[in-house]
Amino acid sequence: MVTAMGEVKAAPSVRKAAADRGIDIDKLAAELGRTTIGREDLETAKSAPAAAAPAADTAFWEVDHAAYGPVTAQPTSRFDKIAAKNLGAAQAVIPSVTHHDRADIGAVEALRTSWKSEAAARGVRLTALAFHVKALARCLRKFPKFNASLSADGETLILKDYVHVGIAVDTEHGLMVPVIRDADRKGLWQIAADIADLAGRAQARKIGAEEMGGASMTISNLGGIGGTAFTPIVNPPEVAILGLTRTETVPVWDGEAFRPVPMVPLDLTYDHRVINGADAARFLSHFAGLIGEPRRLLL
């Protein structure tokens, strides 16, 4: 490192500090007309501009598809554009991991069957999703790191003293996520009524913007469609999302023989900056335990 004036002298700690800040110490010496640089000189120097992130290569999208056969151009909806932008950003920023488990839902189905007459009298359709929302609310209270958001700079974890559960609703005009407020304070019947109300109004496009924000965590339920597992994308600023797929009957060894057990697959995707694998496993195991013994949700 030599300038026109000779070798630049600087302590190793000064050189390291300059390198950390992107300062060219030889150029700084030349600008100051000095051959010795101290730490105080770095305070007046301008850091080198950060290298810009390489632009995404979109050449593979810029294709004349009509050259290969008939096509139809269909504009994307406003909902789809918003979802694409948000989910794309989430995948780019969040180091996500998906933990898979399953829960015995036999007791839930037995309760739903035994309460059919009461459900009819109340005019409420008691779905399995209501049990999942209630169980998730319990888990969010027991595991507060899942009921949190990470600040944009990653320096602060904001822990929430409320439990709001989002429910993803597939509509003709796109995916909507209305929110059940204070789910931890509501009983199963009220949660079931809220699900029916929110889902119905989402389908009719009568959900207000204020009803779709501030969720502690979201449930994406594909059980009515199919599948055995999937990897839902975390919906920021949430730090986790729970996916459900179709219940299947599987043989489970009870110590003496195999017995058929209805099991619902569970898929928990989480932000690994906030949640580690052991925490995720404990969270989903506790959730499965609540679904396996749903009367605990009534306490």
Image: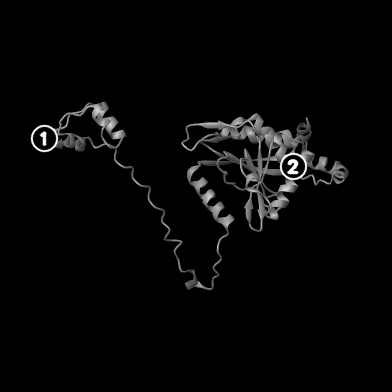
Residue 21 found in image quarter: top left
Question: Element type at marker 2?
Answer: helix
Query: Left of 34 or right of it: where is 223?
Result: right
Query: Left of 82 or right of it: where is 113?
Result: right
Check disc 1 and give the amino acid type.
Met
Q: Which quarter of the image is occupied by the C terminus?
A: top right
Q: Which quarter of the image is occupied by the N terminus?
A: top left
Question: Which residue lies under the disc numbered 2?
Answer: 130
Q: Nearer the viewer, residue 85 or 68?
A: 85
Residue 123 seen in render: yes
Q: Which mark is residue 5?
A: 1
Q: Position of residue 246 (x, y in %)?
A: 70, 49
Question: Element type at marker 1?
Answer: loop
Q: Position of residue 97 (x, y in %)?
A: 55, 41
Give how far apart the Cα atoms at labels 1 and 2 are. 77 Å
Check disc 2 and give the amino acid type.
Ala
Q: Taking 66 as reference, is 207 above or below it?
A: above
Q: Position of residue 152 (x, y in %)?
A: 48, 38
The local crowd at label 1, few if under 14, some if 14 to 19, many if 20 or more residues have their Cα within 10 Å, is: few
Residue 258 seen in render: no
Query: Left of 256 or right of it: where is 219?
Result: left
